[in-house]
Amino acid sequence: MATPAALRRLLLGTLLIGLTGTAIELLLLKHYDAPIQLVPLVSIALGLTTIGWHLVWRSRASVRAVQGVMILFLVSGVAGVVFHFRANLQYQREFDATLHGRALVWQALRAKVPPALAPGVMVQLGLIGLAYTCCRRSEPT
């Protein structure tokens, strides 16, 4: 059976791989044309910096900082889904003015550019980060 420390290391490794991969993908997609598109990139940079701080000093403050950044990930992920979905709705309405109701929603959700649910990866990363920091206050660092 895995120890809590081993599970935390696995969560941290998963988080770091996810952050790095997502950052690379966003850069390759040139997800920086508009200021709002910088939100996930800045969040990831902040996350990597905060995790680095935590790994070096392992203090209660660094755990709280990582938790705060992970909550930021949750918020930015939900906001990103809303922004992508609204952009898709607008495009679908312009493309086919006869669409409405459920058909319009499904077309917006299935659109490839921008992918409506792609920002959900920020929510996943935030949850992984919060799981990593879970119960850190009561255990030795």
Image: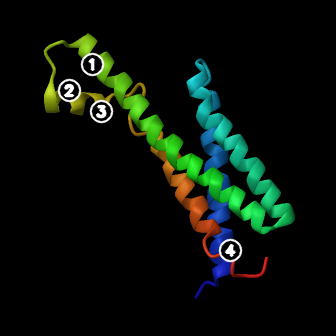
- Please identify, in this view, whether the residue under mark 3 or under mark 4 is nearer the observer: 4
Nearer the N terminus, badge 1 or badge 2? Answer: 1
Disc number for residue 136: 4
Crowd rating for badge 2 (residues with CA inside 10 Å; few <14, some 14–19, many 20+):
some
Q: Which residue is mark 1?
A: 92
Amino acid type, mark 4? Arg
Q: Quadrant of residue 35?
A: top right
Nearer the N terminus, badge 2 or badge 3? Answer: 2
Distance (Cα) linking label 4 and label 2:
45 Å
Amino acid type, mark 2? Leu
- Please identify, in this view, whether the residue under mark 4 or under mark 2 is nearer the observer: 4
Give the left or right position of residue 100, taking residue 93 as reference.
left
Distance (Cα) linking label 3 and label 4:
40 Å
Rendered view: 62 above or below 42: below
User: SS at mark 2?
Assistant: helix
Residue 27: x and y in percent read 64, 30
Q: Which residue is mark 2?
A: 104
Q: Nearer the viewer, residue 18 or 44?
A: 44
Residue 136: x and y in percent read 68, 74
Give the left or right position of residue 108, taking residue 26 as reference.
left
Distance (Cα) linking label 4 and label 1:
46 Å
Amino acid type, mark 3? Arg
